[in-house]
Image (cartoon, rainbow, N blue to C red):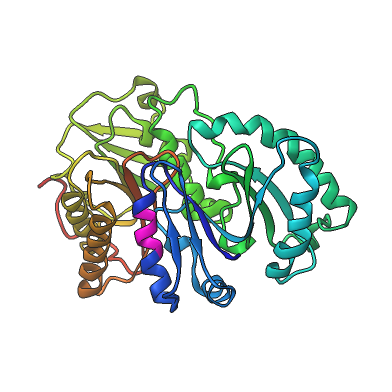
Amino acid sequence: MSGIVVHVRQGFEDDAAKELSHQLNDCGVTSRSMQAIADSAIVVVTLSREDMNLARSKLKLADLIFSRQLLWLSSFVNLPAEGDRVSSLVDEIKGPLLEISGSNAFSGFFFETPDTDSSKELTGFCKSLTRHVENALNKIKLMPKGKGASHLPRVHLVMTSNHQVLVTLADVHNSSPWTMGIPRLRFPPSAPSRSTLKLEEAFHVFLGQEAMGEKLQAGMTAVDLGACPGGWTFQLVKHRMQVTAIDNGALDEKIMDSGLVTHLREDAFAYRPYDTVDWMVCDVVEQPAKITSLMVEWIVRGHCRNTIFNLKLPMKKRFEETTACLNHLKDRCRESGKMIEVKAKQLYHDRKEITVYVAVKSVAKRSISTKSG
């Protein structure tokens, strides 16, 4: 057996499957069996070995909005109810998985479950098996240590029930570095809302650790549209940016005490800056098409160099709505002559929304409109 396994947000399996089908068609993979069970938080695609190799060379996690993690499947293992459960897993890893890996060893090992409430019951079982499987792999020298091994694929065992495990691997340069694709972020006690984790995760996913130092510098200018109570402003202040927070509501007093924030009680859809800002962020609750149009104006008119915004998705046709909004954004920027980089992902801290990052490659030195209206 061979194929693809992706981790997704529970309830979005159908959207992830539609997107995978679209991307696989673009890769030239037309023969497949797709399993997207509602509320399972994973999608499994069965492919021939030849088609899996083709997909592995062309399919990119960065291009998948509704998938958090991209894994390559070698087999299902049914664990015995009692007795030795380790040997069957190790046999699959050193046999079929190693064969499809294209290497002679692995850089790491994850034992994980889908991100569902029911799967939480399996986490203790996974932890108890992890040490035994990892020790067995070390004994047969399949997990060498050191920087020289960092480029090797990583083993992922995905436990879908108390007896079934999907044996998969991740290519380290085409996968999330986190278990289940979920970064482990701590909620800052001084942050005014948990929405602050959305923007923090977006920085990690879209920029990466190295680019964060370049893109998020002290003294940069930023605008937070629909800022209150200040969860996203908190992240900008954390990086010592000068922030203009736009919202008719009240902003958290601790954020104002930073001395880095100017709070303007204005309409997020009407406000425009005098000069181009380094960052504009937006988590306004509104129809995705309306938010997209607002973002297009900010980008095309040169109001910002970078933006991160959320699109709140409808109940139905979420993949279609996402595609339409992103295509509109790209088309309008292309027509205006703006060169942009676009990344989009349904992040772990998102709910029924996706987060979009746009970096403008060419932008006017000064904005062409006035501050309001």
**Location of residue 83 (image quadrant):** top right
203 horizontally vs 329: left or right = right
The majority secondary structure of the magenta stretch comes to helix
Residue 159 x, y percent position in the rendering:
61, 43
Asked whether 19 falls inside the magenta stretch, the response is yes
Quadrant of the image for the N terminus?
A: bottom right
Residue 152 versus residue 259 in the image, above or below: below
Residue sticking out furthest to the right: 139
Asked whether 200 falls inside the magenta stretch, the response is no
Q: Nearer the viewer, residue 62 or 74?
A: 74
Residue 183 x, y percent position in the rendering:
55, 42
Q: Nearer the viewer, residue 301 or 150?
A: 150
Residue 20 x, y percent position in the rendering:
41, 63
Bounds of the magenta segment: 15-20
**Location of residue 249 (image quadrant):** top left
Q: Residue at x 43, y 26 (%)?
A: 191
Residue 7 versus residue 52 in the image, above or below: above
